[in-house]
Image (tube, coloured by chain):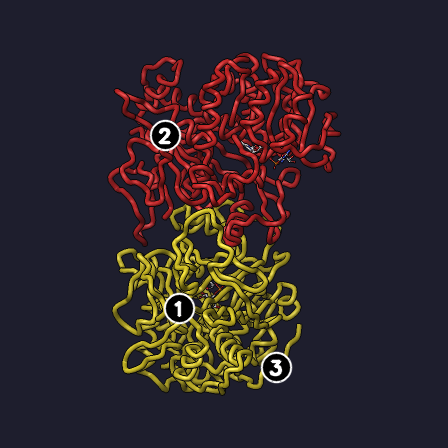
Chain colours: A yellow, B red
């Protein structure tokens, strides 16, 4: 165990909703890095502490399954002004908890902007209403109406969250390597201008998780390194991506939303059924799943350049997730079950025997090559740093920590997306918990080394067209 | 160990080309069931016997890598009239070895009709020339010119091979269950008429392999329960399927061959990149790979009814293969490598901890429901029966044994596909080695229990259309 204390400390109460893989990994980090005492932490979660983790950490845990009807009644008595509510549950509505925190004067943070249950699986809703795009527009509308409310950091984990900061570091590092003269941008407009100047056409969140265990997946079991419920939820939302200005082929299954920022589109198919080609330095070329993520939308929006009311520049942005091999097999089985979740679920932690999470942003389009910037955290490193974590949860916890530090320094910003958080604060707090953090240039393109055996839809004229990334 | 002797015995020499997972599993079966002595067996293979399996079995093994140039010179001195050549290598041309056997008066058998290396991976060839359809037409043309040559059983393993016999048993069992009055068909025409009468529109070879091991797949490793080389070879041939008369949607990537029997089509994409929905009784609904297999073509041809020179009936026939979970992960990785085979390969046998191979034919279209008939062989059962086997290799070896017995009884039939072999002889010889052999009715259709969340190409008017099986 080890790692430095952050510059801020926090004397209020931390109320954590949900006590799954992320919350369990985060609490020791709050002790270590924020100087939080066990007595400051209160967990409210849906199921009892069967593994005794809360007991081992010395924190209080109350069992309440929160609903739309009971959440205010349960949580309001627990929150005073200046306290911090962390929504780390699944199926507990972010917007309702933001509202509650504002009325209590409490800070808020989640790692996922989520609705109450029933929305994602409601086939009567048009796909746009099941999208992260819609959830974001609803949240941003609320935020616009409450600009000086207590800071509420939404979608602030690793991805979304940390990767939004990685992106800014990557842009600055590329500029430095390319000897592009630039000072650190101070606002959205300047970041977008920098991305445009660097010819960034496509951004992937390129993640390869190689964590594995000798305890094999059983049939009818979904295995993952973090929430199975949340992963399957998002995997069965429509695939979503920020849609760049360089794109010249409209995907046949794509839809615009017709409302809101218009920075992103959806594909009318589940992300878990949508494969894309990507690349990470250690993994090399791989196929990942284009699962919808908040950052695909917020980054595309953040980096949009408008000129005379027209969109002049925007990159394509999406996730290219290669989860651990057991999750790939779980997804294959889930598809065969017509996307009806397996009865057994397992989140790998203590039983992991080896592997790492290679998580970063991949910036493409510059003539010099592609640039990947991110964290490579091995399971052994994660374990040496903190208990109750695997590599994945610690990356998420580090992103949460970074945003908490920033929120405490910036207490009245209302609803804040990761793109609006100062990346320097996030990186400083998160860095000690991320293993090796590297920026690497590469010569990969989605057309490189294609097999000549079969025709594939492609645009040979521009490697950075989405049609070249998508697996047909 | 155990299992009965077959009615025939064999006094000649068994020359086995290749000594991989299938040959190693077959030899003990030949000892046990055919009364073959170790001194009768001679192996010619590309690599030395590093594991000492040949030594343990007491058989002679000579290391020769056969080529188009050297194969006759190496093999001719080893073969006398009445000997049996088993081609269980990868990349050793079936047709050339059939020719050689005919000139020596020797029996021939393979489990895969294969070319010399260089054909499947030659992108300059049109996909039809890389297909099993083309290889079959070449082989059948040779066979037509040599109708009374020594019997040469081609593509006679488990699938193709045994499953072609399963199909006949299944048709008879369906007829019996449905009280359709029928005597056992005596020829192709009668089998086709029976399939038509039973309303069989689609036939899958529906296989789910659940064998697994605690020794996890490493990155850059392809793991399977039988030949990795042969599986990847066929997986990167075009996907091929027998094309039924009930089909009313021409797949956008389909091609007819324009020569030969015309019973099958190809999709201009690799089988390992082509998923289909299928069902097996223990597994339930699953997604498998539509990998080209000889039986998809030969069964469709065998069951074609012609009236007045027109094709009046033919079922759609294809493979729906769910290999072991490690192979699914291997394929995912291989796709990410643009189909360039991983540097490490592993065939699971002694290290298998549990699982079975559920392998059968699934007959669809009859109003009563779908009918699956096949073998469920667990790893424990396979081990109890014979050494040097897993469940998969023993099913293959049983199919080889069945055809060898039939060939010895029918020594001058020239080139013979599994469909022309008497299924009663095959089943009698193979049955003791197959674990549980069952026929099961089911109410599955590829439209059953579909998720309502996303649109999928489908034809609601007829569940048995290929568009309903194919994963888009
Ligand atoms: N941004 C990121 O990088 C990132 C990464 C991982 C997870 N996440 C998000 O973090 C959250 C937590 O993930 P996890 O892996 O810890 O999930 P988990 O499935 O391991 O745990 C979920 C927890 O929520 C609790 N819960 C569920 N419904 C509840 C209810 N109605 N009331 C109270 N508690 C309830 C469960 O009891 C459980 O303790 C999820 O929203 C997930 O999407 C974000
Ligand atoms: N029909 C079926 O059900 C079925 C099932 C499994 C395998 N098969 C076929 O059986 C055959 C053997 O499969 P396997 O799993 O034993 O394969 P394997 O990869 O385990 O072994 C292949 C063997 O062939 C030898 N070999 C390769 N090239 C050679 C050459 N040029 N000269 C001499 N020997 C050479 C190798 O040294 C090795 O011993 C393959 O053709 C495969 O497609 C058919």
| Residue sitting at x 67%, y 26% | B73
Subunit under mark 2: B
Subunit under mark 3: A
Which of B323/B415 is in front? B415
Rendered image: mark on residue A263: none
| Residue sitting at x 47%, y 17% | B422
Eyeballing the image, is A9 above or below A469? below
Q: Earlier in the sequence, mark 1 or mark 3?
A: 3
Dot 3 crowding, Cα within 10 Å, few <14, some 14–19, many 20+:
some
Instruction: Find the distance from the CA under tag 2 to the CA under tag 1.
Output: 45 Å
Which of A227/B73 is in front? B73
Subunit under mark 1: A
Element under label 2? loop
Element under label 3? loop
**Residue A63 showing in the rendered view:** yes
Element under label 1? strand
Question: Where is residue A16 drawn, in percent x and y?
Answer: 48, 72
Dot 1 crowding, Cα within 10 Å, few <14, some 14–19, many 20+:
many
The N terminus of chain A lies in which quarter of the figure?
bottom right
**Number of numbered discs visible in the structure rendering:** 3
Say if mark 2 contacts mark 1, CB within 8 Å.
Answer: no
Residue pointed to by mark 3: A5
Which of A74/B56 is in front? B56
Q: Is residue A465 left or right of residue B37?
A: left
**Residue A79 showing in the rendered view:** no
Eyeballing the image, is B322 above or below A143? above
Q: From the Cβ of disc 3, is ligand 1 less than 8 Å away?
A: no
Residue pointed to by mark 1: A316
Residue pointed to by mark 2: B263
């Amino acid at each position: 165990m080890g790692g430095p204390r952050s510059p801020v400390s926090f004397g209020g109460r931390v109320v954590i909703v949900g006590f799954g893989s992320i919350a369990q990994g985060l609490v020791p980090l709050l002790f270590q890095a924020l100087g939080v005492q066990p007595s400051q932490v209160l967990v409210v979660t849906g199921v009892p502490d069967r593994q005794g983790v809360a007991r081992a950490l010395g924190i209080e845990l109350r069992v309440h399954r929160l609903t739309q009807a009971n959440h205010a009644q349960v949580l309001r008595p627990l929150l005073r002004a200046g306290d911090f509510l962390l929504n780390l549950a699944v199926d507990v509505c972010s917007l309702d908890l933001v509202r509650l925190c504002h009325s209590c004067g409490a800070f808020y943070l989640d790692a996922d902007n989520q609705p109450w249950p029933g929305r994602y699986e409601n086939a009567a809703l048009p796909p746009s209403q099941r999208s992260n795009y819609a959830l974001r527009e609803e949240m941003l509308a609320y935020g616009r109406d409450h600009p000086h409310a207590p800071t509420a950091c939404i979608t602030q984990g690793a991805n979304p969250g940390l990767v939004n900061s990685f992106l800014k570091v990557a842009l600055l590092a590329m500029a430095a390597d390319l000897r592009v003269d630039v000072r650190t941008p101070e606002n959205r407009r300047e970041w977008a201008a920098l991305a445009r100047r660097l010819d960034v056409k496509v951004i992937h969140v390129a993640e390869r998780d190689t964590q594995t265990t000798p305890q094999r997946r059983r049939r009818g079991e979904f295995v993952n390194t973090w929430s199975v419920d949340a992963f399957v939820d998002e995997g069965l939302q429509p695939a979503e991506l920020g849609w760049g200005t360089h794109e010249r082929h409209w995907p046949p299954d794509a839809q615009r939303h017709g409302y809101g920022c218009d920075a992103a589109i959806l594909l009318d198919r589940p992300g878990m059924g949508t494969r894309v080609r990507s690349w990470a330095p250690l993994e090399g070329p791989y196929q990942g799943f284009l699962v919808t993520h908040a950052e695909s939308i917020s980054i595309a929006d953040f980096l949009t350049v408008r000129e005379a009311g027209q969109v002049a520049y925007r990159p394509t942005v999406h996730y290219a997730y290669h989860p651990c091999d057991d999750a790939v097999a779980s997804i294959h089985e889930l598809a065969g079950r017509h996307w009806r979740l397996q009865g057994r679920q397992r989140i790998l932690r203590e039983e992991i025997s080896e592997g790492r999470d290679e998580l970063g942003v991949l910036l493409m389009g510059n003539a010099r090559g592609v640039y990947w910037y991110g964290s490579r955290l091995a399971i052994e490193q994660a374990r040496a740093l903190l208990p109750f974590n695997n590599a994945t949860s610690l990356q998420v916890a580090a992103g949460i920590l970074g945003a908490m530090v920033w929120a405490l320094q910036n207490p009245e910003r209302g609803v804040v997306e990761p793109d609006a958080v100062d990346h320097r604060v996030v990186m400083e707090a998160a860095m000690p918990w991320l293993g090796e953090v590297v920026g690497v240039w590469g010569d990969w393109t989605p057309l490189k080394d294609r097999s000549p055996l079969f025709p594939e839809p492609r645009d040979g004229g521009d490697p950075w067209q989405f049609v070249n990334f998508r697996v047909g």
